[in-house]
Amino acid sequence: MSTAKKDYKRVTVKSLVEMKANGEKISMLTAYDYTMAKIVDGAGVDVILVGDSASNVMAGHETTLPITLDQMIYHASSVIRAIDRALIVVDLPFGSYQSDPKEALRSAIRIMKESGAHAVKMEGGKEVKESIKRTLNAGIPVMGHLGLTPQSIYKFGTYTVRAKEEEEARKLKEDALMLEKIGCFAVVLEKVPAQLAKEVAESLTIPIIGIGAGNGVDGQVLVTHDMLGMTHEFNPRFLRRYLDLYTEMTNAFKKYVIDVKAVDFPNENEQY
Ligand code: KIV
């Protein structure tokens, strides 16, 4: 498979489909604020997801359910102000699209209008088909999300690997095909067996972005705070930590406390 990399000045939903066709893997990370988004975008990450994982990472909730549409718009607006190149996808939060297609469209329009985002993401398959279709019909690009769907955590009860059994795997394949057919530009597959994810990726022309779904898919996504090692209670097998910022930051804060207490900070060069 080719690893040739075309130079995209600005990543669009079309670029992602082209990347898949050219065998170029897609990189995606989360960001919820201006400073982090600036670094992630500057590093050349293709897609920035303003994920509803902000509910856990930024607000300290146990699940993604409490975050509101207004809060997602606030996070997305901060991210949009930072970026030059990446495609910005924003999660529609729990309760903003499941009840009916009109509500889904209203929520998606608010995100696009008020934050300037480029696309939205919704969790689920045929249960939310009409909501996704309505949003797509208004010209708003939609990314799907199948497998482990954290907004349904109370239905499933655990965050374990999904679609290990034949029946669930069959439904997932049908849902992925349906999402492509109705016009989604990509699908996130979370925490499913690598072989299943590979089969889904090979059967579709739109990109499959995996998280805990092996390397047979078209791209990867991680929660930035997890891959930087800022969080340390969350240790799933799929998570590769590129830094141990929890320890680095703790040591820096401890050193600061020592310096302040010892009147070592500020020194003569650090004052006016
Ligand atoms: O909210 C989020 O961060 C996500 C990713 C884990 C895919 O949906």
Image (cartoon, rainbow, N blue to C red):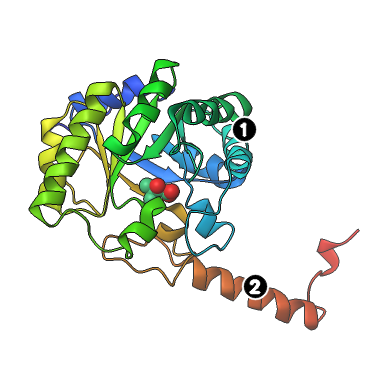
The residue at the point 47 percent across, 66 percent down is: 231
**What is the quadrant of residue 60 in the picture?**
bottom right
| Position of the N terminus by quadrant | top left
The residue at the point 27 percent across, 60 percent down is: 238
Identify which amino acid the numbered label 2 is placed on.
Phe
Residue 10 pos. (x, y %): 44, 23
Does 128 sit left or right of 119 as displayed? left
Res 253 label: 2
Where is 203 relative to 215, above or below?
Answer: above
Which of 151 and 268 lies nearest the eye of the viewer?
A: 151
Where is 120 relative to 153, above or below?
Answer: above
What is the secondary structure assignment of the residue under circle 2? Answer: helix
* Residue 119 visible within the image: yes
Task: Nearest to the eye among marks 1 and 2: give it.
Answer: 1
**What is the quadrant of residue 205 in the picture?**
top left
Q: In the displayed image of the protein, which residue is found farthest to the front?
A: 99
Number of other residues with Cα within 10 Å of mark 2, as a class: few under 14, some 14 to 19, many 20 or more = few
Which of 174 and 144 lies nearest the eye of the viewer?
A: 174
Where is 106 relative to 153, above or below?
Answer: above
Identify which amino acid the numbered label 1 is placed on.
Arg
Q: Which residue is mark 1?
A: 81
Which badge, 1 or 2, is on the more N-terminal residue?
A: 1
Q: Is mark 2 within 8 Å of ligand 1?
A: no
Res 98 label: none
The residue at the point 32 percent across, 41 percent down is: 124
**What is the quadrant of residue 133 in the picture?**
top left
* Residue 18 visible within the image: no
The residue at the point 23 percent across, 26 percent down is: 180
Rounded to the nearest angstrom, the CA distance separating label 1 from label 2 is: 29 Å
Residue 6 pos. (x, y %): 29, 24
Residue 246 pos. (x, y %): 51, 69
